[in-house]
């Protein structure tokens, strides 16, 4: 009996893409995706090896490509709406590759001031070693992006929402400036995740993820990804990936592949709880300021409401993170040390709620002056909201606030 014709996976809803997308079964017909823990591959003949290295379909070496890694890449690309995805060993490997694959000595990068500390280090300390200059612009200030452009500008880099104070940049407006300048736009989309925001539909050329965060979502493995048009990824990154070796391990790819299955459920539930907690925190007398993109008092709320829609769906809150200011470092430390349910950790996007003090952890490598540029004073705490009961989380936060 002939099998019925299959749907085009691109036409599936998000939930179906996350469960079925990219799956390839071996001759054994396994239910779950297989882990191909292999370094290399065999050929039927010398002629077959010759043809494979000349470009015929098939695998050569797991530093180049691997069946399990490819399943993860294909599923994430399907979710993102990208032509291609290249998985990396970590989020920072993805950011580094995304930037350096598009520039050479004499080129110029324009980046938002509010970036993860390691991203700022790459721009301030690493890129200059190779003759690449950077100008930093306040993310929401579109005129500043335009004024920062030089004839040699090749890349715009931004995070939105940005780490750690959830600053929002208008991706479409920045992308329009980049097009005029002949530059490519890289968006680090880790805080929003592909569930809440699709930068490629807003005009970005490249999207990067730390898959360690929401995509795994359970604190197990490291991983990263670069997504965009196939031709761009081939031209800018293919040889760089092959010859520098930032390969994602097949085991980690398998864990991340299974993490994608529940990504939509987790991110939407976590966002609902984050919105609930943000409202409670904003009303607490010990909180000097509270930042959450889903609240109308966020400085860039209207931009967030417009672009954090994942292709037209209603905004499900403003993501899974909340930032709030307790006024001073001793109060922030007192709060963190009094938490009983929420863990102290610099990670985020996990099923377990976590809180950190950015000044002394994620943004420690920045100078005090650089932190003040983005408004990061020592009283700020960044909260990554997990899957626990909202009421249990608030009880823990409220108790810790009393201790602060």
Image (spheres, rainbow, N blue to C red):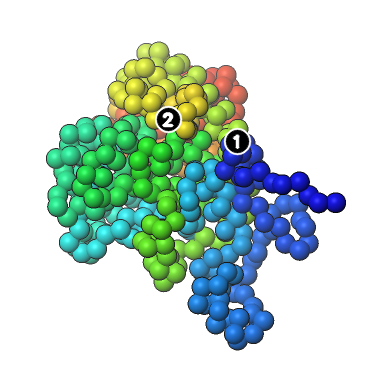
Which quadrant is home to the C terminus? top left
3 sits left or right of 278 in the view: right
Choose mark 1 or mark 2, whichever is in front: 1
Q: Quadrant of residue 116?
A: top left
Q: Which residue is at 76% across, 51% downward?
A: 31
Residue 371 horizontal/vertical position (percent): 25, 38
Query: Up-down: is 221 above or below 176?
Result: below
Q: In this orientation, does residue 304 appear?
A: yes
Residue 100 horizontal/vertical position (percent): 31, 59
Q: Secondary structure at mark 2?
A: loop
Residue labelled with disc 1? 13
Q: Which residue is at 57% across, 58% downward?
A: 70
Q: Quadrant of residue 265?
A: top right
Query: Up-down: is 63 above or below 13?
Result: below
241 or 350, which is in the foreground?
241
Q: Which residue is at 47% across, 42% downward?
A: 347
Query: Up-down: is 179 above or below 143?
Result: below
35 sits left or right of 264 in the view: right
Residue labelled with disc 2? 308
């Amino acid at each position: 009996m002939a099998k019925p014709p299959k749907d085009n996976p691109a036409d599936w809803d998000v939930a179906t893409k996350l469960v079925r997308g990219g799956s390839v079964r071996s001759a054994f017909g396994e239910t779950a995706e297989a882990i191909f823990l292999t370094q290399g591959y065999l050929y039927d003949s010398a002629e077959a090896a010759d043809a494979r290295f000349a470009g015929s379909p098939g695998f050569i070496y797991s530093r180049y490509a691997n069946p399990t890694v490819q399943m993860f890449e294909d599923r994430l690309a399907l979710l993102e709406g990208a032509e291609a995805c290249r998985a990396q060993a970590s989020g920072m490997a993805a950011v580094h590759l995304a930037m350096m694959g598009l520039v050479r000595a004499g080129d110029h990068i324009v980046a938002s001031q509010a970036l993860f500390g390691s991203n700022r280090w790459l721009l301030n300390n690493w890129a200059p070693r190779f003759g690449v200059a950077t100008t930093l612009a306040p993310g929401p200030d579109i005129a500043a992006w335009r004024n920062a452009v030089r004839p040699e500008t090749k890349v715009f880099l931004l995070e939105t929402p940005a780490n750690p104070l959830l600053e929002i940049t208008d991706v479409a407006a920045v992308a329009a400036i980049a097009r005029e300048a002949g530059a490519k736009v890289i968006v680090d989309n880790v805080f929003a995740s592909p569930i809440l925001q699709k930068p490629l539909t807003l005009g970005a050329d490249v999207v990067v993820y730390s898959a360690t965060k929401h995509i795994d979502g359970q604190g197990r493995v490291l991983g990263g990804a670069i997504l965009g048009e196939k031709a761009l990824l081939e031209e800018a990154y293919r040889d760089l990936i092959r010859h520098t070796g930032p390969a994602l391990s097949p085991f980690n790819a398998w864990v991340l592949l299974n993490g994608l299955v529940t990504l939509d459920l987790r991110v939407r539930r976590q966002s609902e709880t984050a919105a609930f907690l943000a409202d409670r925190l904003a009303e607490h007398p010990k909180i000097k300021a509270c930042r959450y993109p889903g609240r109308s008092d966020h400085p860039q709320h209207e931009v967030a409401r417009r672009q954090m829609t994942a292709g037209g769906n209603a905004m499900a809150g403003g993501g899974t993170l909340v930032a709030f200011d307790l006024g001073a470092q001793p109060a922030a430390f007192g709060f963190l040390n009094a938490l009983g349910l929420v863990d102290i950790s610099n990670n985020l996007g996990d099923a377990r709620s976590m809180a950190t003090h950015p000044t002394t952890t994620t943004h420690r490598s920045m100078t005090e002056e650089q932190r003040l540029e983005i408004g990061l004073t020592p009283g700020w705490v960044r909260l990554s909201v997990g899957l626990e009961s909202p009421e249990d989380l608030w009880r823990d936060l409220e108790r810790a606030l009393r201790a602060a």
